């Protein structure tokens, strides 16, 4: 069953409104509601004094109405008494001060004292609700990022991590190249998290910073495991446990953190106004493909955009007609089996007063609510999608390590790792080809084409997997900044693309971090444009497909094709603009005889959901533009309104 529902904060509303809310939810077609993820203060108003009366009541009322419940552990927001009585439970910021209270997410995830109280509140919750038949899943905490806390406990844990990773100070100094700027470490106690003046972050040793990011991600994974262990003391195995991921300044390592969780869940807040720049890739399709790729199975949307929102910034333009339903269906088209809208109604108090919900402050359901209701009804006719999955011929590789390494050392103005992945998803999605965004060390069997966007920190497993994939006849697209670093974040002493050079059939003669300038490319008589980065390629066994037409390296190769065993490697020396990437995507698909649609207008994507045996069950055509789009697909004339989703049962 594909679930639909809302995030609901009954604790902020007069009880007299609960019955009315639930009746409207039921009438609208809401199947599932998430509650309680910030309500520790109400559950334990005084240390050791618990009050679950309100939660008992709302769970009973929702359950009686046949609405399923997802319960959040409230550990993102401990009550003020905890922080006041035990200040060491607060995290420490980069400037060395304890995080200010009165916000949320203040806790140090490693603090033993915090964990003691977190375990107790989780225990109290599971005592009451672990076996409640209406509670169908648990969410851990809220939007966890990598733990960048700089407190003494975290500093000690970071040092333990480094000891385990490097073994000795000698090895650590060597790995980091600590002799640069007299940074040699002679005592483990000299190592701290990167506390200090904020502006100097990128002046720290990159080996040290990458290890800190790795530790911070591992720490969050450990925190998730701690909560799983506490929940599982009472929560039966058949009840899934998840957490809601988002992209933040320091995101968690999704692939590592979700291993022990049962399902991946994502908070999806797409754009409401599309940029005028035709080169902009504003779609959230890549994020959805990544979330499905995390566990390589269908996923959930725990929060979905429902209204204009702001508080930390000015309010954003409200969802345009079609976006409430269209974006919800886009998630399903990419493999979501649940979409919960954040939130049922707009808060009337608190910092997020202007992060609106489906129902505005007036309390009168309006246009956005009607669209949500329409979506709920439409979903009831889509039950044939139950049990279907998304199968993709194309994989795009992703690694948190690469994301971290590029955040530590920006390669060129405009160079952004995640942006590159989005652009590749866009190149294939616009041809109606499903893409999986999977971990860089994942098994590649079953794929026809693999894109390796900027594999900067060379992972030997990836090198091995890619080599075998090509030897077995697959097609690989390599892009700039591949094979540059070793795993300690030091540069490798070899012509680029380093460990991939033989596969690529070319090396990088020199490179030009060109930034936001445009360069011209000639590909078999077609003039194309690239930007951000230019590798001047020198073919060895490969042959040049395209050459630069501008800059002092005009005439030199920009794209090289190589045949290696029975496979093909396309090396792009540039971060192409959309037409260039589209052409590369087609060349890769052609080399594998993968069919694609060549008639979709820009901004229209086509995806499919398949049965377990791979036969296509549903085709989704989504117009993610602000204009009406008319086109012909397989002989059929199709017109889609802005944000309209057409679904065909096959
Ligand atoms: C995140 C949080 C929510 C809320 C929304 C507002 O997704 O998880 O609690 O703050 O953002 O957009
Ligand atoms: Zn800490």
Image: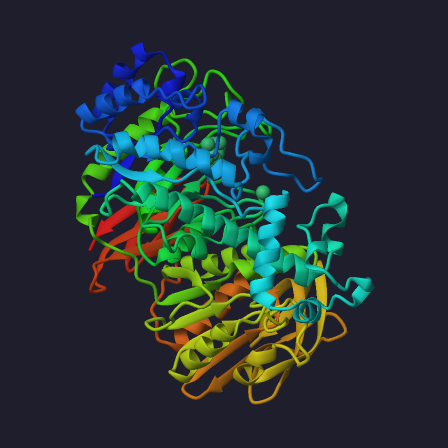
Looking at the picture, does residue 518 appear above or below residue 372?
Answer: below
- Ligand 2 quadrant? top right
**Could you tell me residue 340's position as x and y percent?**
34, 35
Nearer to the camera, 383 or 125: 125
Q: Is residue 640 visible in this depiction of the protein?
A: no
Looking at the picture, does residue 128 appear above or below residue 194?
Answer: above
**Could you tell me residue 208's position as x and y percent?**
67, 60
Viewed as shown, does residue 401 lie left or right of 134?
right
**Could you tell me residue 268's position as x and y percent?**
43, 41
Viewed as shown, does residue 249 lie left or right of 618?
right
Viewed as shown, does residue 579 lie left or right of 624?
right
Q: Is residue 182 visible in this depiction of the protein?
A: yes
Q: Residue at x 26, y 36 (%)?
A: 130
- Tell me how many marks there are: 0
Scheme of image coloration: rainbow
Nearer to the camera, 88 or 543: 88
Q: Quadrant of the N terminus?
A: top left
**Could you tell me residue 504's position as x and y percent?**
55, 81
In which image quadrant can residue 5 be found?
A: top left
Looking at the picture, does residue 65 appear above or below residue 600?
Answer: above
- Residue farthest to the right, as pictured: 181
Nearer to the camera, 79 or 459: 79
Q: Residue at x 53, y 62 (%)?
A: 579
Q: Residue at x 22, y 29 (%)?
A: 67
Q: Quadrant of the C terminus?
A: bottom left
Looking at the picture, does residue 631 appear above or below residue 595?
Answer: above
């Amino acid at each position: 069953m594909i679930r639909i529902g809302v995030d609901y904060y009954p604790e902020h509303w007069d009880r007299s409104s609960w019955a009315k809310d639930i009746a409207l939810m039921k009438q609208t077609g809401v199947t599932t509601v998430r509650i309680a993820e910030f309500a520790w203060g109400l559950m334990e108003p005084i240390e050791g004094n618990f009050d679950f009366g309100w939660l008992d009541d709302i769970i009973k009322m929702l359950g009686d109405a046949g609405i399923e419940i997802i319960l959040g552990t409230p550990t993102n927001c401990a009550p003020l008494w905890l922080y006041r009585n035990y200040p060491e439970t607060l995290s420490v910021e980069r400037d060395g001060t304890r995080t200010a209270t009165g916000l949320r997410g203040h806790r140090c995830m490693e603090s033993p004292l915090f964990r003691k109280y977190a375990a107790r509140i989780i225990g109290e919750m599971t005592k009451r609700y672990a076996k409640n038949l209406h509670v169908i899943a648990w969410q851990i905490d809220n939007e966890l990022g990598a733990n960048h806390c700089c407190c003494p406990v975290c500093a000690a844990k970071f040092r333990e991590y480094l000891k385990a990773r490097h073994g000795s100070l000698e090895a650590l100094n060597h790995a980091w190249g600590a002799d640069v700027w007299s940074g040699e470490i002679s005592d483990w106690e000299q190592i701290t998290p990167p506390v200090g003046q904020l502006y100097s972050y990128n002046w720290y040793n990159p080996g040290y910073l990458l290890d800190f990011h790795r530790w911070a991600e591992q720490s969050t994974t450990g925190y998730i495991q701690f909560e799983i262990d506490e929940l599982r003391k009472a929560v039966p195995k058949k009840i899934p446990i998840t957490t809601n991921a988002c992209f933040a300044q320091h995101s968690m390592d999704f692939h590592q953190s979700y291993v022990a969780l049962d399902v991946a869940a994502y908070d999806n807040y797409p754009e409401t106004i599309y940029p005028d720049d035709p080169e902009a890739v504003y779609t959230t399709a890549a994020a959805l493909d990544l979330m499905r790729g995390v566990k390589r199975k269908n996923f959930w949307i725990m929060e979905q955009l429902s209204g204009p929102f702001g508080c930390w910034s000015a309010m954003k333009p409200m969802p345009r007609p079609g976006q409430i339903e269209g974006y919800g269906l886009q998630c399903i088209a990419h493999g979501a089996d649940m979409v919960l809208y954040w939130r049922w109604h707009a808060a009337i108090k608190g910092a997020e007063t202007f992060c609106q919900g489906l129902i505005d402050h007036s309390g009168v359901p309006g246009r956005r609510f009607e669209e949500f209701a329409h979506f709920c009804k439409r979903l009831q006719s889509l039950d044939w999608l139950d049990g279907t999955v998304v199968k993709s011929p194309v994989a795009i590789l992703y690694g948190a390590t690469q994301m971290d390494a590029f955040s530590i050392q920006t390669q060129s103005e405009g160079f952004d790792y995640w942006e590159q992945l989005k652009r590749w998803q866009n190149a294939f999605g616009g041809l109606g080809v499903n893409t999986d965004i999977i971990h860089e060390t994942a098994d590649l069997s079953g794929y026809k084409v693999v894109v390796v966007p900027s594999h900067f920190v060379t992972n030997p497993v990836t090198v091995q997997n890619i080599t075998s994939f090509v030897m077995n006849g697959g097609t690989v697209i390599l892009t700039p900044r591949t094979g540059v670093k070793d795993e300690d974040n030091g540069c490798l002493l070899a012509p680029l693309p380093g460990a991939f050079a033989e596969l690529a059939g070319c090396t990088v003669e020199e490179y030009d971090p060109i930034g936001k300038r445009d360069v011209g490319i000639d590909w078999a008589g077609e003039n194309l444009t690239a930007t951000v980065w230019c590798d001047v390629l020198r073919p060895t066994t490969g042959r040049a497909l395209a050459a630069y037409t501008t800059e002092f390296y005009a005439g030199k190769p920009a794209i090289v094709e190589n045949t290696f065993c029975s496979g093909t490697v396309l090396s792009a020396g540039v971060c192409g603009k959309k037409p260039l990437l589209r052409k590369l995507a087609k060349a890769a698909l052609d080399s594998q005889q993968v069919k694609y649609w060549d008639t979709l207008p820009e901004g229209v994507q086509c995806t499919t959901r398949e049965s377990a045996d791979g036969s296509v069950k549903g085709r989704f055509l989504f117009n993610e533009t602000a204009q009406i789009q008319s086109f012909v697909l397989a002989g059929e004339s199709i017109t889609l309104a802005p944000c309209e989703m057409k679904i065909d049962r096959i």
